[in-house]
Amino acid sequence: KGIEEKTLALVQNLFTDEEERCFSVDDVVSEAGLSKTTARRYLEHCVEIGFLQVEMLYGKIGHPRRMYRRAAGAS
């Protein structure tokens, strides 16, 4: 499936407005009003183009959470 410019801008604006904040997929779902699948696809696209970087957050049990943050120097 393709990447829509309007949706991409919506996701990227979350990270532009709060550059130091890390977002989980669930954060993006609730703040941008996207489905989890769509949010994940756009977040991974942003990682691929160098706009975001991923940090792994390790808890006590289960899989580590992928946290997304604006990449240093991303425009």
Image (spheres, rainbow, N blue to C red):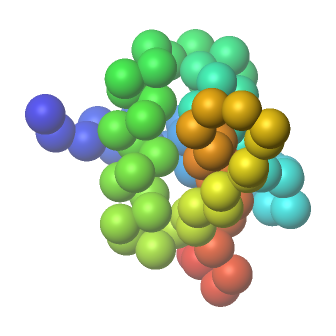
Residue 29 rendering spot, x and y as whole percentages: 59, 21
Q: Is residue 11 left or right of residue 59?
A: left
How many numbered badges does the structure rendering display?
A: 0
Q: Residue at x 84, y 53 (%)?
A: 21
Please state, as top left, top right, bottom left or bottom right, where the N terminus lies in the image: top left
Residue name at image x 47 percent, y 46 percent: 43
x then y, percent, for residue 44: 40, 51
Q: Is residue 62 above or below residue 55?
A: above
Q: Measured from the top left, where is residue 64 in percent x and y?
A: 63, 44
Horizontal arrangement in the rendering, residue 45 relative to residue 16 (left or right): left
Which quadrant holds the C terminus? bottom right
For the residue pair 53 and 55, the one nearer the viewer reads as: 55
Let me know if residue 56 appears in the view.
Answer: yes
**Which residue is pictured at 73% across the width and 51% down the height?**
57
Q: Is residue 24 above or below residue 68?
A: above
Residue at the (65%, 85%) spot, across then down: 73
Quarter of the rendering containing residue 2? top left
Nearest the camera: 67 or 46?
Answer: 67
Q: Does 18 sit left or right of 8 as displayed?
A: right
Q: Is residue 67 above or below residue 75?
A: above
Asked if one can make out residue 14 in the rendered structure from this viewpoint, the answer is no
Q: Quadrant of residue 32?
A: top right
Single out the residue that lies furthest toward the front: 61
Q: In the displayed image of the protein, which residue is found farthest to the left? A: 1
Image coordinates of residue 26 in percent, x first then y, are 64, 24
